[in-house]
Image (cartoon, rainbow, N blue to C red):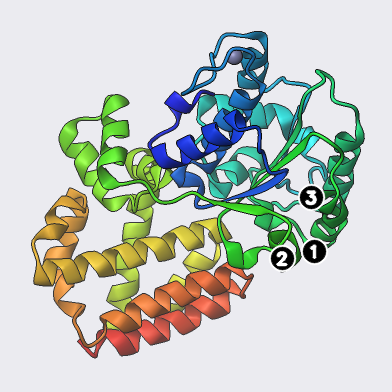
């Protein structure tokens, strides 16, 4: 992958280009930011630039043997590590063909997309201790091509403690010409011992017009691209989901409407049925719902106070918000935001879903009557 194929992030591209040009490459780097900001594509372009035999000031050549091996994901000195569903396989290599396929189809994907790809029952993938031994083994090999050995660890926050602890020594004292690129979304989920051994490279959200441009380049009409970019939170994966996965957002919209309806009516049986329904979803699906709920609360408040929402919701949502928005006011908006944010936070930390959503229903019932 060349830098030119990475959406936006010009400043960061320059930083990475200079790093290679100056020959001062720090051996362990942590790219920190949501996958949808482009951390993985950036890492791939960075590695290709590092390996390229014919690089220019701005990009790798894309044509030399090294570039071709990197872009085919077949470079013998480029290794990948990523979460796997342990019940299926404990090491990333077992999924390497899925990994290559995913990256070739679309390098903008998140853990939810990855989980769906590798496991039809969508169990939570992690990076376990067997994988850490594999990483160490690979990095102890001599470099095949005589240059750098690169290990890209995607979703490094999914390393369990045993795995992370095993890697501390090699992060501290790597074999010569080793480059670690760890990619993570959330700093607070990384062990401090790992954080202190890596140089942090912050990957920031994409400006709305950059997302819009990228969508237009992919053949989306200007109006749709503008609407989706406005709702994407500078996250290209979010934009793709809004665009492609209408089924999922239809489902979340229905769930949201249902939740508000039963809570408004104080219909306890309805609330329990709603909880049962959402409890059958995967954890990632539940997290997406909470993000969707936040989106709807934000748009309601915008509708009440500005006209901005008109560009940020779909036609179906606008229809629902016509009647619903008045239930979100200054008296409850902060409570709703905090409730959905906190629930998202606790779900990520493996809270019991059914209990969490039952409590959420009762909170929603209190808040909605406070409008
Ligand atoms: Zn090249």
Which residue sits at x=91%, y=36%? 140
In the structure shown, which secondary structural element does the residue marked by tag 2 occupy?
A: loop
Q: Tag count in the figure?
A: 3
State which image quarter holds ligand 1.
top right
Closer to viewer: mark 2 or mark 1: 2
Q: Which residue is mark 2?
A: 191
Which residue sits at x=87%, y=39%? 175
Which label belongs to residue 86? 3
In the structure shown, which secondary structural element does the residue marked by tag 1 occupy?
A: helix
Closer to viewer: mark 3 or mark 1: 1
Give the percent coordinates (x, y) of residue 264. 27, 82
Tell me where residue 210 sits by quadrant. top left
Q: Quadrant of the C terminus?
A: bottom left
Indicate which disc, 2 or 3, sits on the residue closer to the N terminus: 3
115 or 12: nearer the eye?
Answer: 12
* Cβ–Cβ under 8 Å for marks 2 and 1: yes
Which residue sits at x=34%, y=44%? 246
Res 125 visible: yes
Q: Residue 106, relative to residue 261: is it above or below?
A: above
**Mark 1 nearby-residue class (10 Å; few <14, some 14–19, many ≥20):** some
Give the percent coordinates (x, y) of residue 195. 68, 61
Q: Which residue is mark 1?
A: 161
Give the percent coordinates (x, y) of residue 143. 85, 25
Could you tell whether 98 is left or right of 265 in the image? Answer: right
Which residue sits at x=84%, y=60%? 165
In the structure shown, which secondary structural element does the residue marked by tag 3 occupy?
A: loop
Cβ of disc 3 within 8 Å of ligand 1? no
Q: Residue 157, relative to residue 241: is it above or below?
A: below
Q: Residue 155, relative to residue 91: is it above or below?
A: below
Give the percent coordinates (x, y) of residue 156. 68, 52
């Amino acid at each position: 992958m060349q830098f030119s194929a990475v959406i936006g992030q010009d400043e960061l591209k320059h930083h990475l280009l200079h790093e290679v040009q100056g020959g001062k490459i720090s051996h362990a780097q942590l790219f920190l930011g949501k996958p949808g900001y482009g951390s993985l594509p950036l890492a791939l372009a960075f590695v290709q630039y590092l390996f390229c035999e014919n690089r220019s000031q701005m990009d790798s050549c894309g044509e030399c043997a090294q570039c071709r091996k990197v872009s085919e994901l077949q470079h013998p000195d480029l290794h990948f590590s990523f979460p796997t569903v342990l019940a299926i396989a404990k090491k990333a290599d077992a999924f390497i063909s899925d990994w290559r396929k995913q990256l070739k189809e679309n390098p903008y994907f998140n853990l939810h997309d990855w989980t769906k790809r590798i496991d039809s029952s969508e169990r939570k993938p992690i990076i376990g201790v067997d994988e850490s031994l594999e990483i160490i083994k690979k990095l102890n090999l001599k470099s095949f091509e005589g240059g750098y050995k690169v290990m890209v660890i995607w979703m490094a926050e999914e390393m369990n403690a045993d795995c992370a602890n095993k890697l501390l020594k090699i992060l501290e004292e790597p074999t010569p010409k080793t480059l670690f690129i760890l990619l993570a979304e959330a700093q607070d989920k990384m062990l401090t011992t790992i954080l202190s051994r890596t140089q942090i490279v912050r990957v920031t959200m994409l400006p709305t017009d950059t997302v819009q441009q990228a969508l237009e380049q992919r053949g989306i009409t200007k109006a749709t691209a503008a609407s989706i970019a406005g709702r994407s939170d500078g996250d290209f994966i979010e934009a793709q989901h809004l665009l492609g996965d209408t089924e999922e957002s239809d489902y979340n919209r229905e769930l949201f409407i249902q939740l508000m309806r039963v809570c408004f009516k104080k219909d306890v049986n309805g609330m329990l049925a709603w909880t049962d329904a959402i409890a059958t979803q995967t954890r990632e699906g539940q997290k997406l719902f909470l993000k969707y709920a936040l989106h709807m609360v934000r748009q309601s408040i915008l509708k009440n106070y500005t006209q901005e929402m008109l560009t940020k919701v779909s036609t179906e949502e606008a229809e629902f918000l016509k009647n619903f928005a008045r239930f979100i006011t200054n008296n409850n908006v902060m409570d709703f935001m905090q409730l959905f944010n906190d629930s998202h936070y606790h779900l990520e930390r493996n809270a019991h879903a059914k209990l969490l959503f039952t409590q959420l229903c009762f909170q929603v019932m209190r808040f909605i009557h406070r409008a």
